[in-house]
Image (tube, rainbow, N blue to C red):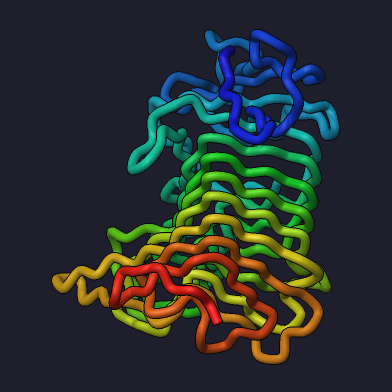
Amino acid sequence: MSLTNYPNGVTSFGVPVMGGGGIPAMYGNVYFVDYRNGLDGNDGKTKTLPLKTLSAAYAKCTTNNNDVILIDGDSEVTEDGKLTWSKNRIHVVGLGSGMFHAQRSRIGQSATGIAAAIDCTIEVSGTGNSFENLKISNAGTDAASVACLIDSGEANTYINCSFMKLSDLDETAVSDAVFRGDSSTFIACEFGADTLAQTVARPTVRFKSSGGTRCKHLLMRDCQFSCASSDSDKAFILIDGTSSLGFSNLMVNPIFTCAIVNSMSAAALDNAIDSASGLVDGNLLVINPSTNTTAVCATVTDQIQVVGPLTHVDAGAPQTPA
């Protein structure tokens, strides 16, 4: 099992590795998922007897044991229901396949899952989990379906993952991802898609509290946000309310790209980020953003600070923030 080392001391699984092999210094059981060839009745402990679904592998994992799940990338893993990830310190790695910018193992919904009254494909509410090389999508058609990912746990890490809500293109209440976690880290992840045009101001990532749980101490580094929208009021990042963001939060080198495609009625956007008017209990610092929107954040700017050269959509030249 050969795993990737990343710059600045980040390693696969988000934990220290022993020299040479790339295996975590402390880890538990390893489970294999192969949707094409696996069976959920298998023990999943060898690649010759893999499990079929991620939910079956998760059920076998022990919380706080640093168990590892490896997902074959030869086919898409589809789930009948929502994955509620409440266990701690489980590490999921996709092994190839995928599309667009990186090789990622795909996780989506079966026909049953698409029609189910579930709010997202996966909600991560546990602590210290890591997810790497995964493409997670949501094509849900039920009114309850609001996102692909809900991040509501603590100290969870996502590396080289993509998140796409492929349905409800005309619903402002949905988004590709919802953030309300504590100390979450996203590295080299992608949010949204530009192949389907949204017709309303539907955010890509929504900061939204629930039951007093709000996003805080977030770190996002080298992440990309994509869309196609006929509504210029759409923002990639939306702080949903004054209770949705707490303490300090950081985005480094984000890229915001809206596809301007006339045949899809997709146009330029006014802002990449919209804050909540009256926000006082949290802030978002954005360092070195790149965007083809008219501004990074110009409409509602409460507690949003942008640092570094900006790319102006009209001139295409660096612009120093005021």
Q: Is residue 138 visible?
A: no
**In the rendered view, does 27 fall on the left or right side of 36?**
right
- How many numbered circles are shown? 0
Which quadrant of the structure image shows residue 316? Answer: bottom left
**In the rendered view, does 287 fall on the left or right side of 90?**
left
246, 144: nearer the viewer: 246
Q: Could you tell me residue 269's position as x and y percent?
A: 36, 78
**In the rendered view, does 161 fall on the left or right side of 65?**
left
Q: Quadrant of the C terminus?
A: bottom right
Which quadrant of the structure image shows residue 150? Answer: bottom right
Q: Could you tell me residue 66's position as x and y percent?
A: 78, 27
Residue at (65% x, 35% y) in the render: 8
142, 272: nearer the viewer: 272
Q: Which residue reaches farthest left?
A: 263
Q: Is residue 152 visible?
A: yes
Residue at (41% x, 33% y) in the render: 103
36, 150: nearer the viewer: 150
Residue at (56% x, 63% y) in the render: 117
Image height of 238 relative to 9, above or below: below
Q: Could you tell me residue 199's position as x and y percent?
A: 33, 78
Q: Quadrant of the N terminus?
A: top right
Q: Could you tell me residue 24's position as x and y percent?
A: 73, 19
**In the rendered view, does 62 fall on the left or right side of 167?**
right
Residue at (51% x, 35% y) in the render: 133
